[in-house]
Image (cartoon, rainbow, N blue to C red):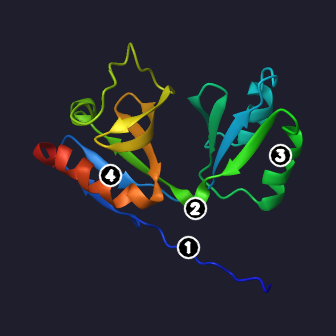
Amino acid sequence: MPDIALKTRPVLDNRSAVGDLIRLQSLPEETILLVIASADAGDLSAILAKAAGQESNAVRAAGPGQWLLVTTSALSAQAIDDLGAALSGKAAIVDQSHGRVRILIEGEAVEAVLAKGMPVDLAPSNFPVGKSVTTMIGHLSTHVTRMQDNAFEIIVTRSFAETLWEDLVTMAGEYL
């Protein structure tokens, strides 16, 4: 079978919505890897930290024995293969890059906006910078990470990115 070069198009294509108290911004669609540990994997934090490499890349908890490796620039096929080799027998890797979209929501009203659609207490004492949770926003399954005091990254499946964007704009309406 001949190789066919697929061309992906960003779903939200650098979309933004900005108000005095809230800002929504679509983020670049780069590498997102789901890492699922085997039952006897042990501590994988050192391997995952090394895989994250650059400061702008991050490993985020996605559930018991599951993490998302999120990068701000595309990882090469060789880098992904190297990670697979380092995790061989300890974890499986599933590339989610073309199936997930990232959205940044930030501003003074961010907690009030997100509280309209998700059942998670986002108070900084309960949800500090760096904490992640897989939760629903409205009827959509999402992965939410507090990036800074007033900034959250939301990852959603590609097929629901437009719907989530519209929901977030509606939820933020009074602040836009």
- Residue 16, horizontal then vertical, whole percent: 31, 58
Find residue 89 and report its image quarter: top right
Residue beneath disc 1: 8
Label whose residue precedes the other's in the sequence (4 or 2) = 2
Q: Name the quarter where the N terminus is drawn.
A: bottom right
Label whose residue precedes the other's in the sequence (2 or 1) = 1
Asked if labels 1 and 2 touch by Cβ distance under 8 angstroms, the answer is yes
Nearest the eye: 39 or 76: 39
Residue 84's tag is 3
Above or below — where is 6 with respect to 114?
below
Above or below — where is 38 with respect to 34?
above
Report how far apart the C-alphas of labels 2 and 3 lie in the structure: 18 Å
Residue beneath disc 4: 164
Q: Residue at x 32, y 20 (%)?
A: 121
Looking at the rendered structure, the kind of residue marked 1 is Thr
Q: Mark 1 falls on what kind of element?
A: loop
Residue beneath disc 2: 98
